[in-house]
Image (cartoon, rainbow, N blue to C red):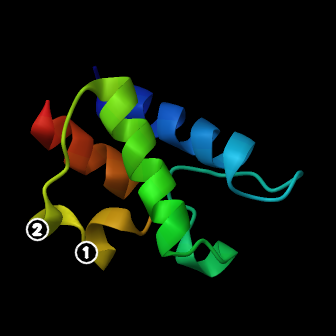
């Protein structure tokens, strides 16, 4: 799977499940700026683990790796 494909999947999940209707999530949309909190981040991580069959280690859970859908995808690609 490509980074772009994974980014689209993650962005779509966030848009459909975690933000208000009408909010569009792009690859580089800053998720904390939308008010997504730690519980939302856990939801995203659970989605990634189920969808892509990876386990995200705690040491990867920092701001740089969770700021955007693209950042989450970058980590996912590293784990595949």
The residue located at (33%, 44%) in the rendering is: 73
Q: Nearer the viewer, residue 70 or 12?
A: 12
Q: Residue furthest right?
A: 22
Residue 44 location in percent, x, y? 46, 50
Checking the image for residue 59, the label placed there is 2
Residue 22: horizontal and vertical position, in percent? 89, 52
Q: Which residue is mark 1?
A: 62
Whole-percent x and y of residue 39? 52, 67
Determine whether the residue tagged by mark 2 lies in a helix, strand or loop: helix
Q: CA distance from mark 2 to mark 1?
A: 7 Å
Badge 1 local density, few (<14 within 10 Å), some, or many (20+)? few
Verify CB contact (< 8 Å) between mark 2 and mark 1: yes
Q: Position of residue 33 (x, y in %)?
A: 62, 79
Total numbered badges shown on the rendered structure: 2
Q: Nearer the viewer, residue 48 or 5?
A: 48
**Pointer 2 local density, CA inside 10 Å: few below 14, some 14–19, many at least 20:** few
């Amino acid at each position: 799977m490509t980074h772009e494909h994974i980014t689209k999947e993650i962005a779509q999940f966030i848009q459909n499940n975690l933000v208000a209707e009408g909010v569009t999530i792009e690859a580089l949309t800053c998720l904390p700026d939308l008010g997504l909190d730690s519980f939302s981040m856990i939801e995203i991580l659970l989605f990634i683990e189920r969808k892509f069959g990876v386990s995200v280690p705690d040491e990867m859970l920092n701001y740089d790796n969770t700021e955007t859908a693209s950042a989450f995808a970058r980590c996912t690609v590293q784990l595949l």
